[in-house]
Every structure is written in structure tokens, then in C-alpha cells.
Image: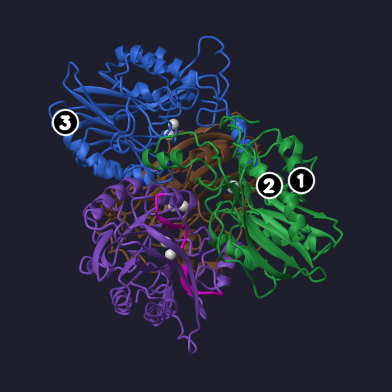
Chain colours: A purple, B green, C blue, D brown
Amino acid sequence: MLKLLFLGDVVGEPGRRAVIETVPRLREERGIDFVVVNGENAANGRGITPKITIDLLRCGIAVITSGDHIWDQKEIVPFIDTEPRLLRPLNYPANTPGAGSIVLETPKGKVGVINVQCRTFMNPPLENPFLAIDAEVKRVREETPIIFVDVHGETTSEKIAMGRFLDGKVSAVCGTHTHTQTADEQIFPGGTAFLCDAGMCGPSESCLGREIQPIIERFLTGRPILYPVARGPVKLLGAIVEIDEPTGRALSIERFSHVYEPPEPAPAPAPVTTAK
Amino acid sequence: MLKLLFLGDVVGEPGRRAVIETVPRLREERGIDFVVVNGENAANGRGITPKITIDLLRCGIAVITSGDHIWDQKEIVPFIDTEPRLLRPLNYPANTPGAGSIVLETPKGKVGVINVQCRTFMNPPLENPFLAIDAEVKRVREETPIIFVDVHGETTSEKIAMGRFLDGKVSAVCGTHTHTQTADEQIFPGGTAFLCDAGMCGPSESCLGREIQPIIERFLTGRPILYPVARGPVKLLGAIVEIDEPTGRALSIERFSHVYEPPEPAPAPAPVTTAK
Amino acid sequence: MLKLLFLGDVVGEPGRRAVIETVPRLREERGIDFVVVNGENAANGRGITPKITIDLLRCGIAVITSGDHIWDQKEIVPFIDTEPRLLRPLNYPANTPGAGSIVLETPKGKVGVINVQCRTFMNPPLENPFLAIDAEVKRVREETPIIFVDVHGETTSEKIAMGRFLDGKVSAVCGTHTHTQTADEQIFPGGTAFLCDAGMCGPSESCLGREIQPIIERFLTGRPILYPVARGPVKLLGAIVEIDEPTGRALSIERFSHVYEPPEPAPAPAPVTTAK
Amino acid sequence: MLKLLFLGDVVGEPGRRAVIETVPRLREERGIDFVVVNGENAANGRGITPKITIDLLRCGIAVITSGDHIWDQKEIVPFIDTEPRLLRPLNYPANTPGAGSIVLETPKGKVGVINVQCRTFMNPPLENPFLAIDAEVKRVREETPIIFVDVHGETTSEKIAMGRFLDGKVSAVCGTHTHTQTADEQIFPGGTAFLCDAGMCGPSESCLGREIQPIIERFLTGRPILYPVARGPVKLLGAIVEIDEPTGRALSIERFSHVYEPPEPAPAPAPVTTAK
Ligand SMILES: [Fe+2]
Ligand SMILES: [Fe+2]
Ligand SMILES: [Fe+2]
Ligand SMILES: [Fe+2]
Ligand SMILES: [Fe+2]
Ligand SMILES: [Fe+2]
Ligand SMILES: [Fe+2]
Ligand SMILES: [Fe+2]
């Protein structure tokens, strides 16, 4: 049995710190074999940098997935081809830097991870994610039946349809992007574990990891405003999936939620618009 | 202490039957004082009819909320002004049939219910929901501090911002529209209970209550297709909120999830496009 | 020199009648060699039927293009594979019924027509139109340099980018979908004629071919309402492009606008939701 | 008879220079009484600054309208209340800085200008523009029947519906936002002149005023890229409306198109993201 931990979108410095300090301990205490984290908001809420990628991988994360914010920090474009453990959504056109899937060797066998992005209410428009993943799953299954999919999308209908479409073909499908964990964890009839959205790793007293008041102000006035990443205790949200190695079937899925209390006042967040 | 049960979007005949057969028992067994249900998909998945409204109210539901599907069945337009317990979103322009809030007498005091609709990725575009509800909450609070809000919307950011905006002003804010229950139930610092989405009352083996295969087909092909309401066991999803009557503060919020097994084969669903 | 007439979206019975009675005369009077018409709204404003397709082709139209309304009438799905002169947007997934391009023999040489759909604010989401047309133009150019492209889309930015992208590769690019003719007809530096939107063939006293009052009502109230096709004099809008056969370069582009007065009271329009 | 010139969205330094050098000459040569210009893209393509506002007003422009880019340059927020001749869309919530209409004295009588923003595919979501303008037109008509409306919006349906809605209540309705002039100039039955989109004042060899290649690149790759304002000859696009002063009725509407050749190489554009 392989135990996989997936954590949703890491938001800014508070989210990174919480993940980096918690993942090593979690791996030990909970007997986690493989950690996947969505990092699309790790750089002050917008994208991810090479340095942050390295910091996250160093703490014991095997693969970093992403989504619509993947290109927000421009240093990531030349970097992504040098680090295959950082995924961008699979369904970009051919010749896009980076890759949408990876297969890694582990002591318990090969593990495949695929990252795909939905299209409903998402920008930019990408190629059909259902067709793209259908082909990719076939390729990855030639190497291993243990496959984890991060489906990054806005609507429940597209993410649930993706989970149902992949039922029996992959081990687990977890959604990301809404930053809010759903309570629909289940194993579909074909043996695929599913959670519509994993939630985020970011400050609890926040609106999707950002300070609350500016977001409310925006909705009240319709005028632009800066949304700094919030501070304070951080919730790590995601799922733990137990997978039968020979078949790749999910044995269990459990929602994961853990509160991290920063040991001292967090440093002031970097200005919102800076690409660190 | 007043105990309120809120159930998310009732989908079609399977959802209605499950609600109608379960609510009376639930009220007794769980000591529920007040039941609110979102009925925007009760008529074969699209809107609600006068007859369905009456059936739902008769089984012990106090107030029916709705959302973007409120006008799907055209008999509802003349009917809604005759039945104040069926709400349409508050933030329609003045002179729209129906109302977006109601205050009802109960043995434990007056209870206010408000229904508001978000704007991000929602159709039709309505008036600013934050400004509309701010004024409405002030009016309702002159009658009672016990106020329940159904915020019907697509994005977590707008629904969470609404919950935070109303913190300390109402008893509870629950979201609807995504048909997927979230796992973020909590009481905000000001005493307002919150759940980003209540989920739905519809068939479990489904995509938002609809048959799974047609939805997958639509995403694969991009071509129109009928989406019949699914059958089989029904999940009733929502929340139970305990409210302190004198202050209107939430004492607790608990996610609610209950499986209803139809006693015999459900009748064939009506054709998808028919307005029953 | 080959003279091509393109007419924008034909709306309902008034648009069809105007086109069918005017095209034969126009071909003669103006020396038109080749007529392309967008037919996506020909069937009472929604889609096109096999019978209407045949009627339009019989009056001297060589190719009918379409757009997001192509599948509105369900008889078109089995029919489209039998009539290659009715195009659907090119950038649907493989295995979609119909085709997005055609090459026809004419006395002045082979003429290629391609129909492609944009993605910004368009439904359903299709595959990348720039990549799809790039490959298709290469295929068609092996047969002929005379190529006309109907780019069906909402935004000026995507349609202009498409025109510029194809500059030097095709003879002409005309947009459709907004039903409003633009005044930016021009020949780009590489020799490709361009018009951002051709406009429609539908009643002048209308809102995109529909009766005006219901559309205003919809914007005022946010409630659903039927939009019947309007009546009265019809404007035929489009463009005439003169093309140099050996090179496929556009020699001229002229906006086309012609008013058709129905000879007698038009028959009452069919009910809006009926598939005739 | 009052002769009004309206010019569409001024794009960056090339657009400003062309407008500033051309408007004084035009006023004289064409006998223009009143000039209205949309300035929402005047500051390097994004918003407008106080200094640019002043420069534009000094050259003989009476009123500057705007749209969704009005707040892009943050100095405009405190400034807009000090300069009533710079309008923001009318249908923002109450208490928004600035105003959506103005009435100015001229030698030929009072002239009212109203700026309103559509909602379909527009961000941020604003209040119902039809209801907002209905009330505003009533107020302005108490002062003068000569009223010009800039309706800033994406779709032809919403802009045409607005024009028809205002027919007989104002002198002229011109659309903006698509940066592409439409060819549907007309006087509606009630005496209101209409043009669905005025077009822009920006470089001709461009995509909406921006360099062409980056825009194509964006559509090809789906990855972010900078879009600098283009250079070279500038087209000034808009409309000239002749208005009968006593009644406010439009006597004529003519599309306006004028090419401005910069006398020397334009200076290199400022970096795209800078707020000058
Ligand atoms: Fe995210
Ligand atoms: Fe995202
Ligand atoms: Fe619903
Ligand atoms: Fe809904
Ligand atoms: Fe059309
Ligand atoms: Fe269309
Ligand atoms: Fe603009
Ligand atoms: Fe704009």
C-alpha cells in the first residue's frame, strides 16, 4: 500500500513556511510515501519562482503541480524545462515549455502524476482537457498503474466529469483552484478516489489566502485594489489517498486538514506586485 | 436555542421525493425548528413550479430559496407574488415579481431568510449583491436578529467575501449553486456561521444530479446533448445551525449529509425539456 | 480575377428569403464568381436544417459556413457528413461530424473555404483556432492559393489577430457572429483582404435580427423572454473580394450592403423554440 | 445646428499626439462645436492620468469619457472629483468618485454627455446600465435636450439595445471598447443617431492599438506576454453628429476616419507596466 498526500494551492510565504515545516514531520508521523503539492500561488500569491520550487522539493515534496498562475513569475519559463518535478497543465499546445506529467521511481514502485486544467470560466483557453488526459493516461499506464491527477478548475461540473471520466483509469483525482476544500471525498465504482477540491495551504483568516477587507472592498466598489496575502495561522488542506500498488486502485481517501501556527510574527509580506 | 436545517439545491423528482419523505422525520428526530431548502432545480432540474412549491412547503419546509434558475418554469412568474415563502434572489431590479427576503413567526421568535445571488460567472447580471444585502439586513434586523442567508453563486471568493461581510450581522450564511458541499463549515469571529456551499439534494451517482455519461460526452465533443436527471440513491446535503435567539449568534454549525434510498424503482424521469 | 461575395449570418425566414431572391440577381449584375454565406442562424435564428441548407445551395451559394449555432437543429448532425458544402468550425476535436474546410472546382480554378471559431467569450470551448487553421491552410494551399476564411468570433482582438496571422497565407478573412458590419475593410501588407465582421442578412429594424422590444426587456429585467425574429425590410451585409487567381492575393475588398424589401407581408414567424 | 465630433478610445502616446495635433484643426476646418473623446486607454494603453486629462482638455476637447480601464492609473481616483469633464461610467454604485454625466454651456446651448458601461463580458460587474441611464437621461433632459451618450461595451446586442432604448430620448448614442469602427451609422425612427462602435484613435498597423506580433503570440501559446502600444501612422476614428438644438434630434450622423502621420519617428513607448 502506497500512501500519498496531496496538498492544495500553497499561498505565499505563510503557506510555504507552513508546508516546509510540516511536510517532513507529516511524512514520518503518518507514514506518507509520496507528497504532491499545488504550487501555483506560492510566490506571494502569484505563480512560483525557481527558488521556491527548489525549497519545496527539498522539504520532501515529490512533485509540484500548478494551474492558471503557472507563468505569473517570468523566471519560471526558462526554468521549467530544467525541473521536471514542477508540472504545468498538460493541455497546453505542443512546444509549450515544461510538461504536464511525470513518472517517478519510489521504493514502492513507479508513481505517475498528471496536471490538467479545465476550461469553463478559466483563462487562458487551453486544449480539450478530456482528450488530452485520455491520451496521457494511456502513455503513463504503460509505465505504472499508480497515477495521481490534479485537475485545476473553477466549476464542480467539469471537475466531477473529469473524475468520473478517469474512474478506473487512475488512482486518484483531486481538484484545485477554488482554494476551498469540498466534502465529497469518495471512491468511485471503478476504484478511483476523488475529491472535487483539495482546498489551499494558506492563512485561515482570509479570503482564499488574501486579506479579507480588500476583497470585500472590491466587491462593494468595483474598483481595483491590492490584495495582500493574509497572515496568522495557516490551514494545510488536501487529501491522503491509500493506493494498492499492483492495481493502482485507491483503497481509501481521507480529507486532510491541519493547522500550522507560525512560531513568531511572520515577516511583513513582500509588496503584492513584485516578482520576487 | 433555535435549530435550523438548510438543504442545498433539490434536483428533480428524485430530490423532491427524498426531501418530502425525509424532512418530517428529520424535524422530529433532530429537533429541527426551521427548515430552509433551495428549490431552484426542483422541476426536473430546471426551476420550480407552483405545484412543487406547494408540495415542498407542505412537508414542513418553512422557506424555499432559489437562484439563477428561478424563472425557468414560466408559471412561476405570476405565482411568486402569491407565495412569499418562495424567494427569488434579492438583488433583482425594483419591480421584479417576488421578493428576496421574508420574516416568519415561529414558536421561538421571528426568523428572517434572505436569498442573494453572486455576479462572478453568473447569468443574468444582477445588481451589486453586497450593497443590496447590506440594506436588506438592516431592514430585517429591525424585526429579528435571527437571519439566515442563502448566497447563490459560482465562485468561492465571492461567497466567502459575502460571509465575511455579513459576519456579526446575520446568524448564518450558506452558499448554493455548485451542488457540491464544501468542508469549510465554521463560525466567524463575529458569530456568523458559514458554509461556502451546502451541496445538493439529488442522486449520488451523478454529475450535479444529472446522468454522468451525457455530461462527459458534452465535455469530450463540445456538442449539445440532453442531460437527464439521474436516478438511484439520493444524498441530502446541507447544514444544521444552532442559533441563540436573543442575539441571533450561531452557536454551532454542522455539515449535514443523509442518504435516502428510494423504496422502489423511481419512475422514469420526465423528458428533459418539458415544463411540468 | 475571381470575384467572391461573402454574406454574414442569415437570420430566419426573412434573411433566407432575401438571400434566395437576391443572390441570383447579384451574381449576374455584379459578375460574382463564388458566393459564401454564413448560415448559422438560418433556421428561425437558431442553427440550420437540411432543407434550408439545400434551399440556400440551390440559389447559387457555393459554400455555407457556420459557427456556435451549428448544432442547434439536431437533424443537422447526421446530415452534415452528407453535404460537404455546409461547414462547421474547423477547430472541433477529431471525429466531429462534418468538416471545417472545402475546396471546390470553379471555372476560374479551385477555391478553398475555411470556417474557424474563436474562443474568447465563445461557447463551447474549442481547440486553439490559430494552430488548427495554420495546419489547415497548409493543406488547402497544396491545392489552391485562393482561400476564403470565415472567422466566427465575439472579440475584435481575436478576429483581427487571426486576420493578421493569416496575412499572406490566404486571400481573405472575414469575421462573423456579432451581426454588425465593421468599417475596417482593408488589404493587409501581405495581400490578404480583411473585414472584422461582415454583419448579417436579417431585418433592419431589429436587434441582431430579433425583435427589439424583447431584447430591451431582457436587459431591463434580467428575466428570460422569447426573442422572435423581426420582420420588414432586410439588410444583406457582407463583402465583395476580388482575388488574383494565380497568386491568391486580394486585389480589392469592398463592404457590401443591400436592402431587400419583401414584396408582400412576410408570413408570421414560426414559434421561437420550434425546430422547423 | 450643433456639430459634435466624437472620437473613440485614444491609445497611448501615439493616439494622444494625433488627437492633440488634429482636433484644433478639425474644429476649424469642419466647423465642429463640441468634441467628446474616450480616453480610457490614453496612458500607454491603460487608463488615463491627471496630466493626460489636462493635455486633452486643453486641445479643445470638451468632455473625456472612459470605460473599464478608468481606474488603471491610481492617481485618477483622487483627481476625478476635481475634474468633472472626465467621466467614469455612470452605473457604478453611489459614492463612487467622479460622475457619469455632465452638462456644459456652449454658445449653441447646453450639451449633456453621459457615459455608461455594459455588463455582458465586461469587468467589473456594474449596476444595470439601462435602469441607470433611464434615470440619468430624465435628469439631464430637465436641463437640455442635446445629449450625447458613450456606451462602453463588448457586445453588439447590448449596445444596440441601449441605442434603441434611448431612441427619442437623446441626440446620439455611440459605442466604444472594441476599438473597431462599425459601419451601421444610422438615425433611429425617434431621431437618435447611432453607431455601434466608434473605433479608436491609435496606430493603424496594430491589433487594437497594440503591436501585432505579441497578440498573435498570446493566442498561439496561451502564455502571458507584454503588449506594447504600436507605432506609425494613427487612425482617428469616430463620428460627426449634427444636432438640432431646440429638439435635440440628430439631423445627420457620419462616420469619421482620419489618418495622422507622425511628423518624425515617435519616441520609444514607455514600458508597458509603468504608470506614468
Ligand atoms: Fe490557486
Ligand atoms: Fe488557479
Ligand atoms: Fe442549482
Ligand atoms: Fe444555480
Ligand atoms: Fe450569428
Ligand atoms: Fe454565432
Ligand atoms: Fe478601450
Ligand atoms: Fe474598454
Q: Closest to the observer: C205 or A4? A: A4
Look at the numbered disc 3 and give the secondary structure of its residue.
Answer: loop
**Disc 3 chain ID:** C
Residue ID for mark 3: C145
- Inter-mark Cα distance, 1 to 3: 71 Å
* B107 up-or-down from A262: above or below: above
Amino acid residing under circle 3: Pro
Q: Closest to the observer: A231 or C149? A: A231
Is residue A259 among what the camera can see? yes
Residue ID for mark 1: B59
Dividing the picture into quadrants, the one containing residue C95 is top left
Residue at image coords 40%, 39%? B217
Amino acid residing under circle 2: Val
Residue at image coords 48%, 43%? D31
> Is the residue at mark 1 from the same chain as the one at mark 2?
yes
Nearest to viewer (mark 1 / mark 3):
1
Q: Which residues are magenta?
A: A190-205
Look at the numbered disc 2 and give the secondary structure of its residue.
Answer: helix
Residue ID for mark 2: B19
Q: Image check: C197 left or right of B21?
A: left
Q: Image check: A207 left or right of A34?
A: right
Number of callouts: 3
Q: Residues within 10 Å of mark 2 (few under 14, many from 20)?
A: many
Nearest to viewer (mark 3 / mark 2):
2
